[in-house]
Amino acid sequence: MGPSNNLWSWNERSIGWSLMGDPNAEEAVLLIHGFGANTNHWRFNQPVRAPTSAHLAIDCWVSGQRSPGPP
């Protein structure tokens, strides 16, 4: 099973994010992609350690499911 894909909205903007693993685990890892990528680039990395920690991947500005930046 792969990571869950979600959308978080705030102040008329949205950010794509995915979570895999136990959200209540003692260890959490935040995955931030590089330029031109998105949360899907972590889909093969997240399952490796998901049984022992939570892995949260977010979409950076104007990437993936994220809304465009300010005008």
Image (tube, helix red, strand yellow):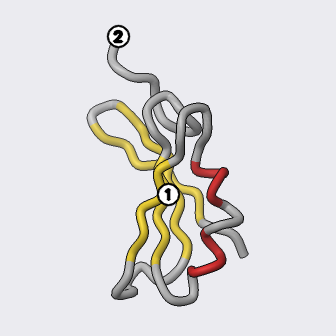
Determine the residue positioned at 58% across, 81% down.
49
Q: Nearer the viewer, residue 23 or 41?
A: 41
User: Does residue 21 sit above or below 58 in this rendering?
Assistant: below
Q: Quadrant of the C terminus?
A: top left
Q: Which residue is mark 2?
A: 71
Q: Quadrant of the N terminus?
A: bottom right
Q: Nearer the viewer, residue 70 or 7?
A: 70
Determine the residue positioned at 59% across, 43% down.
38
Mark 2–mark 1 Cα distance, whole angstroms, equals 25 Å
Q: Residue furthest left?
A: 11
How many residues crowd around disc 1 within 10 Å: few (fewer than 14), some, or many (20 or more)?
Answer: many
**Quadrant in the rendering for residue 61:** top left
Which mark, residue 57?
1
User: Does residue 5 sit above or below 27 in this rendering?
Assistant: above
User: Does residue 47 sit above or below 35 in this rendering?
Assistant: below
The amino acid type, in three-letter code, at marker 2 is Pro
How many residues crowd around disc 2 within 10 Å: few (fewer than 14), some, or many (20 or more)?
Answer: few
Compared across the picture, whether 34 is left or right of 29 comes to right
SS category of the residue bearing label 2: loop
Determine the residue positioned at 33% across, 31% down.
12
**Could you tell which of marks 2 and 1 lies nearer the N-terminus?**
1
User: Does residue 57 sit above or below 51 in this rendering?
Assistant: above
